[in-house]
Amino acid sequence: VQLVESGGGLVQPGGSLRLSCAASGFTVGYYIMSWYRQAPDNPRESVATIFSNGETTYEDSVKGRFIISRDNVKNALYLHMNNLKPDDTAVYFCNVIVNYKDYWGQGTQVTVSS
């Protein structure tokens, strides 16, 4: 199992980014997948989750601004982030649990600043 995130960067408040997570070694549509983020001196927190049936859940502070999605053909996970705020600044990680083992990507930095 391998996860590789991309798409982070520096964006002004109110801007948008799309994060991608390329997956290999498993099929994204069969597993629960999540995006997490970790800001300096803070614990890693769950941002959004997509279940195998397509249902999604979001952390309260990102509801209405972030959308998690997946592409079963490309075997990839995405996080569409709109109306970004400085508090969204963090390293973003994708996550999957396969055969009771947690897998993480290396993370991608998102910085929201004017």
Image: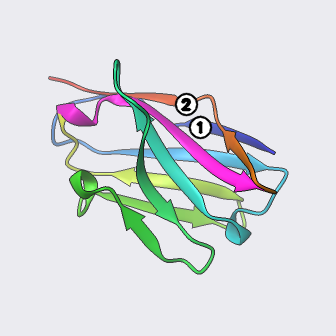
Name of the residue lying farthest toward the bottom:
53
Residue drawn at (26%, 53%), measured in percent from left and top? 62
Q: In the rendering, at what x and y percent does residue 78 appear?
A: 52, 54
Q: CA distance from mark 1 to mark 2?
A: 6 Å
In the shown orientation, is residue 98 left or right of residue 64? right
Quarter of the image where one finds residue 43: top left
Q: Secondary structure at mark 2?
A: loop
| Amino acid found under the numbered disc labelled 1 | Glu
Q: Is residue 47 magenta?
A: no
Q: Position of residue 112 (x, y in %)?
A: 24, 29
* Side of 73 where 113 appears, left or right: left
What label sits on residue 14 in the rendered view? none
Q: Which residues are magenta?
A: 86-98
* Residue under pointer 2: 107
**Farthest right residue?**
25
Residue drawn at x 48%, y 77% is 55
Number of residues whose C-alpha sits closer than 10 Å to that of mark 2, classed few (under 14), some (14–19) or many (20 or more): many
- Please state which amino acid type lies under the numbered disc 2: Gly
User: Which label was assigned to residue 5?
Assistant: 1
Foreground tag (1 vs 2): 2
Count of labels in the image? 2
Image point (81%, 45%), residue name: 1
Give the camera-side residue of 106 and 59.
59
Q: SS at mark 1?
A: strand
Residue at 70% in and 42% down = 103
Are the residues flagged by discs 1 and 2 in contact, CB closer than 8 Å? Answer: yes
Residue 17 horizontal/vertical position (percent): 36, 43
Q: Earlier in the sequence, mark 1 or mark 2?
A: 1
Judge whether 19 appears above or below 26 on screen.
above
Q: Against 87, is 53 above or below?
A: below
